[in-house]
Image (cartoon, rainbow, N blue to C red):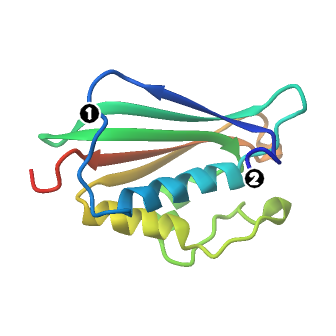
Amino acid sequence: MAQKKNLEFKINYNSGYREVEAVPDQIGIVLRCLLENAAKYSFNGKPNDKRKISVRFNNVYLGEKRALEISIQNYGCPISLEEASSRRIFQLGYRGEYSGEGGRQGTGTGLYLVDRITTAHKGRIDVHSKPDGPAENNQAVNTFVLTWPRYFQE
């Protein structure tokens, strides 16, 4: 999908540890859902101007516990403040207000799984969306921030 839409992934690591403890395959499911959504809801790049999906890894604290923060940012359809602040976007079966534009299809399960798995690992998932250009263009910079404890039992 990323190649078809002329998208490019840009990955930045800060120094330090990037390992986390997780139920096998669970963090993989979370990352796959977030990256697939970023590609699916990104607008197409132009032939000589690829759209970037940025992925950043940082070492942070979640309360007093060491954690890994993974931010995934794309340029695509907006997520309303109400959808983000009420966390409705993470409810089972919910599809965002602008998600169907451009013929995009989905079931509303990806972000639900992200939230459930992350919560089960005592982590956090947040989303921020800010307009990118005139409101009538329905374009936004969306950032999903996954904060995952380094150690599950810590």
Occupied quadrant, residue 140: top right
The residue lying furthest to the front in this view is 24
Asked if the residues shown at circle 1 and circle 2 are in contact, with their CB atoms under 8 angstroms apart, the answer is no
Residue 45 position in % (x across, y down)? 82, 37
Q: Is residue 16 left or right of residue 103?
A: left
Q: Position of residue 134 (x, y in %)?
A: 79, 36
Residue 86 picture location, percent across and down:
45, 62
Q: Is residue 75 left or right of residue 113?
A: right
Tag shown at residue 93? none
Give the amino acid at mark 1: Val
Give the image location of residue 33, x and y in percent.
53, 59
- Return the residue found at the far right: 47
Residue denoted by label 2: 1
**Residue farthest left in this picture:** 154
| Badge 2 density bin: few <14, some 14–19, many ≥20, Cα 10 Å | few
Toward the viewer: 1 or 61?
1
Against 38, is 52 above or below? above
Tell me the kind of residue under disc 2: Met
Q: Considering depth in this image, is 77 or 114 the residue closer to the camera?
A: 114
Q: Residue at x 26, y 66 (%)?
A: 120
3D distance between C-alphas at marks 1 and 2: 31 Å
Whether residue 101 can be seen here: yes
**Frontmost residue, 54 versus 130:** 54
Q: List the residue tagged with mark 1.
A: 60
